[in-house]
Structures are given as structure tokens and as C-alpha cells.
Amino acid sequence: MTFKRFFAVGLLVALVLAGIVSFYASSSPDGLEKVSAEKGIDAKAEDHGLKDSPLSDYGVTGVDNARLSGGLAGVIGVAVVLVAGSGLFWVIRRRPAEPAS
Amino acid sequence: MHAPDGFIGAPASIVTGLAAAAGVAVCLRGAQRELDDRTAPLAGLTAAFVFAAQMLNFPVAGGTSGHLLGGTLAAILVGPYTGVLVVSVVLLAQALLFADGGLTALGLNVCNMALATVLVGYLVFRLLLRVLPRTRASVTAASFVAAVISVPAAAVSFTLIYAIGGATDVPVSKFGTAMIGVHVLIGLGEAVITALTVSSVLAVRPDLVYGARGLIKPLELKTQGAPA
């Protein structure tokens, strides 16, 4: 498999997971939330400072269809993380040694 | 296991913020050796994959769910220093864009989900590879065990930090066991996803798995054995 094809397949898998499969994810509280609520260690938890942001809680504000809203948020997230991550990693990568002139 | 704001007090937020910044700074230096023209895009792809997989909460016992943390997976695929950065990029995007994980808890979350998982997960992975036969199956098996252990390691990290700087007076003895217990179960899910992903990449492009370097024999140029 060529590197290009590998990259394309990997990206497609990420997009399908975030854009489609995520709709079927469990909505139960996660381990930390559950234990925190049971044991009272979340007594002073605060609302998120950006809770009214347009993508808050993995949904797109204004899109009412839950499947579409969550899927769109997931696809946007994959794209943002890919671009931000690749950009960072590209900048700090090891450069091939400059040919001696 | 994204902690919201207000779980730990302001001093603990500052200390964990500084600790996370120091850890990330070390990894920014270390990752230079792991990243080149080929692996830099691969690391970006790994971050996108970890973000996507973190959306997939799977049910564990009793109305509780868990999701991939991804530190062990990222460390095995693209290297431990880069692995910490991969998870940190995901956590930063989640906190800033999706209001998942408090802004003042970002340091705490990086300490637990990026630093602790990679430190423990990658260490266990390397130790296991030392004693296992040098095969692809060993890499997959080691990734499974390392991933299982990395999740309760993150829970231990959270518990220790909460014990010192938590915002309430609930003693560790009240929640530590439950916290670690449920994360052992979540660790099993982490292990399945990690081992599946690592073995899939090994099947098609073993040369792209950082943790399998040295195990995969380079292609040998064989000449026909014609007697000279």
C-alpha cells in the first residue's frame, strides 16, 4: 500500500467514526463523571467557560437533527485536529541535512 | 475522563498547568528526533484518529461509559514524545472548540490523559517487547497489555492530584478504589481498540509503526544462488 493510499484510508476511517459512528456512542456518563457524582468530588464543578460556543458538546448550534449536528461537529473536529496537528508536527520535524555547498 | 473546571482548586490548576507545560516542552524537543517528512503527516493523522475514537463512548458496567484515551496507541504508532503531543493537541481542540474538559483543567487533563498514559503505556510496551519473541504478534500483544494498564494509570494520576489539590474534602479512601476500578474496565476497551489499530497498521505498512522498528527486518536483496 502506498503512503498516500494509507493516509487516505486512515483519514476516511477517522471521518466515518467521528461523522457517522459517533451517533451510536453510549451517552452514559464516563468513568470519571460517574464516580465523581457518586462520591461527591464534583461538588464544586463549574460550567465550561465556552459552553455557549457553536460546537459545544459535539453539536453544531442551529442544526436540529441530532445525527447531522453531531456528525458535522465530528467531521469539523477531525479536520481541525488534522490541520493543527500536522502543522505543528511539520514545523518541529527533523529536516534533512543541508547539502554542503 | 475529561475533568471540568472546579474539580481542583486554583493552586492545583496552576501547578498542574505548569507541569503539563513542562512535559509538553520536553516532548516538543524529543519529538524532533521522531518526526521527519514521512512521520509528521502520520502524526497529524494519528491525532485526527484519536479525536474521532474519543467520541466513541462504549458502555462498561452499570450505566457508565468510557472512551479511548489514545496515549499508548499514539506512542506506539508515532513515538512517545510525539504521542504526548498528539493527545495534547486533541485535548486542546476539545477544550477550546467543544467545551469538553475545563480550560483551567487543561493542565490536569494533559497530566492524566497525555503524560501519564504515554509514560506508563509506552514503558510497559517496551518492557514487554524485551521479553517477548521478536514478531508482529508480540507487538500487538504488548500494545494490548500496555493499553489496559495505561487507563488505570491515568485514574491513579487523577486520584493523586485530587488528593493533594481537590476542591472538596472527600478523602481519597472514599473514591480512589472506585475511580481505579472503573478505569480498569475502560482499559479493556482501550486495549481492544489499541491492539486492533496497531495490528491493522502492521498488516499493511509495518514500517510505519514506530514501536515495531527494529523488529521488522529490512528487505533483503537476494541474489540467485548461481555458483560462481
Image: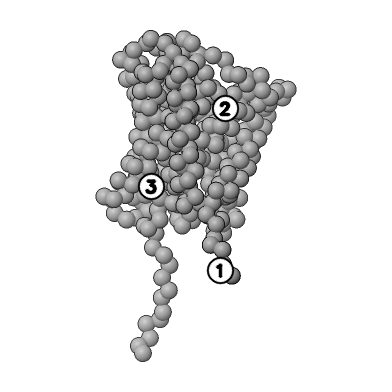
- Percent of width and height locating residue B147: 39, 38
Residue placed under numbered mark 1 in the picture: A100
The residue mark sitting in front, 1 or 2, is 1
Name the chain under label 3: B
Whether A52 is drawn above or below B212: the answer is: above
Q: Are marks 1 and 2 on the same chain?
A: no
Task: Please tell me how crowded label 2 is: few (under 14), some (14-19), or many (20+) other residues with Cα within 10 Å.
Answer: many
Q: Amino acid at mark 1?
A: Ala
Q: Kindly report the distance in space between the C-alpha atoms of the residues bearing marks 3 and 2.
A: 32 Å
- Residue A32 placement, left or right of B130: right
Q: Residue furthest left?
A: B131
Q: Nearer the viewer, mark 3 or mark 2?
A: 2
| Nearer the observer, B33 or A43 | B33
Q: A26 above or below B190? A: above
Q: Nearer the viewer, mark 1 or mark 3?
A: 1
Provide the residue designation for mark 2: B95
